[in-house]
Amino acid sequence: MDWASIIEGLAAPDYEFGRQALQRGIAAVYLIAFVSTANQFPVLLGDRGLLPAPQLLRHPALLRGPTLFRWRYSDALLRAVSWTGAAIALVIVLGLPQLGPPWVPLLAFLVIWLLYMSIVNIGQTFYGFGWESLLLEAGFLAAFLGSNEVPPAWPVLLLFWWLVFRLEFGAGMIKMRGGSEWRDFTALYYHHETQPMPNPVSRYAHLLPKRIHRLEVVGNHFAQLVVPFFLFVPGPVGTLAAAVVIVTQGWLVVSGNFAWLNWITIVLAFSAVSDSVVHAVLPVVPLDQGTGEASMPPWWAAIGIVLTVFYLILSWPALKNLFSRNQLMNASFNTWSLANAYGAFGTVTKERYEIVIEGTLAADPAEGDWLEYEFKGKPGDVRRTPGQYAPYHLRLDWLMWFLALGSPGERWFLPLLVRLLEADKPTLKLLRRDPFGGQPPSWVRAKIYLYRFSTREEKRTTGDVWVREELGLFRAPVSLRA
């Protein structure tokens, strides 16, 4: 077999629809991530942030990996990096780099990958989520999908299938090794109510009959433990497997706010969707999308082969982790956040705790009228229906959920209280409501409550979406002077 035949065999012209969905979808998530960073990073991690990045950068040994900010950080530079990344991502969403030779989208994706990695690696706990590594890995692989001038390459599609497999099968295995609620099919009795950030549908999902919740768990196990193996079968079988992933992830999109985790999983699943199956189901989608007769340059084929070999070697720790009794969840095995381990909700919280921050203008905290601060996403006011924010990521709201579960938070929570005492405008913009209209309170404190969704009868009687029970003080009253 000569080199020309090998190159021809590497072409996958039946996956042009999937390639377009991958490139534009991944870039769209990058766009959201960069905008989220521009809006929130300076307040959370900037020069006057709750966990200032400049302090971290004074200790390079503590950095998670490479970052452009190693030599210099400023809020202005952070914003410049974020908006530059957002602009490049938008151009990819519009499909402009894909109109040129394959090295143009290659360069565009590698730039936004490096820019976002620079942010994540100084983001500390506010960027410690598994979907940050997932986005980085997806962006790196997307760089090798090529342009409209060349057909998609089998080796690169294989790496995307391997990514979806690790993501789904890893999540399934972490559940089977985790809490017994996944093995006795009761996990969904609690999950819709106790998930980090419910959305408008979450209460209705929670109130479904328990037999439906058990079926949800069965469906989850099937989608995550069985279906991923079929992604590696090209054609209708792989497309059907991708459809199962898309539908199950779509239900999670409808019933909760998990930032962009489910959204990007849906996008990645399109890597296994073939044009011929799409055309058979939706004839409006053309079968020949312009690359069927296109040839693959030898240099581009060589890049794909080298990438695949390199990536499979890099994947060995992640493969071992999948079958390890001590399976790691959301772990990176190298500083570049490639070939990672994934997984979520190995155990399901059975009760929902919420920390509510209050303030008072009174000089004496014992005599004050205490008013509550409202966050955008996390529950507070019992009459307020949770909003829909995903795929936008409300980072402070997420950490408030972890804090209520016992996650250490003194390094950022006390600075948050200080910013509220100062009535710091950028910090207040991260909240839904400041009860003092910009006036600094004299004291702030934090209480902890037990929350649950109201029943249908309770909702009809009181109008409340939540029922809560005060459990005590989480943080005693503090003032700037005290």
Image (cartoon, grey):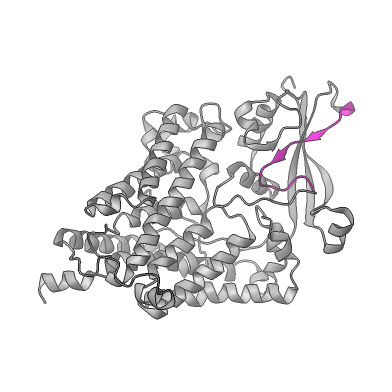
Specify the quadrant of the image occupied by residue 187: bottom right
Q: Position of residue 132 (x, y in %)?
A: 47, 50
Residue toward you, 10 or 178: 10
Q: Where is residue 283 in the image (x, y as percent from the top left)?
A: 40, 74
Specify the quadrant of the image occupied by residue 218: bottom right
Q: Give the range drawn in magenta.
A: 366-382
Q: Where is residue 185 in the image (x, y as percent from the top left)?
A: 67, 74
Q: Identify the residue at image location x=52%, y=62%.
A: 343
Query: What is the quadrant of the C terminus in the image?
Result: top right
Q: Identify the residue at image location x=44%, y=77%.
A: 281
* Residue 82 shows in this picture: yes
Residue 308 lies left or right of residue 471; in this view the side is left
Specify the quadrant of the image occupied by residue 112: top left
Q: Where is residue 161 in the image (x, y as percent from the top left)?
A: 39, 68
Above or below 251: residue 89: above
Query: What is the quadrant of the N terminus in the image?
Result: bottom left
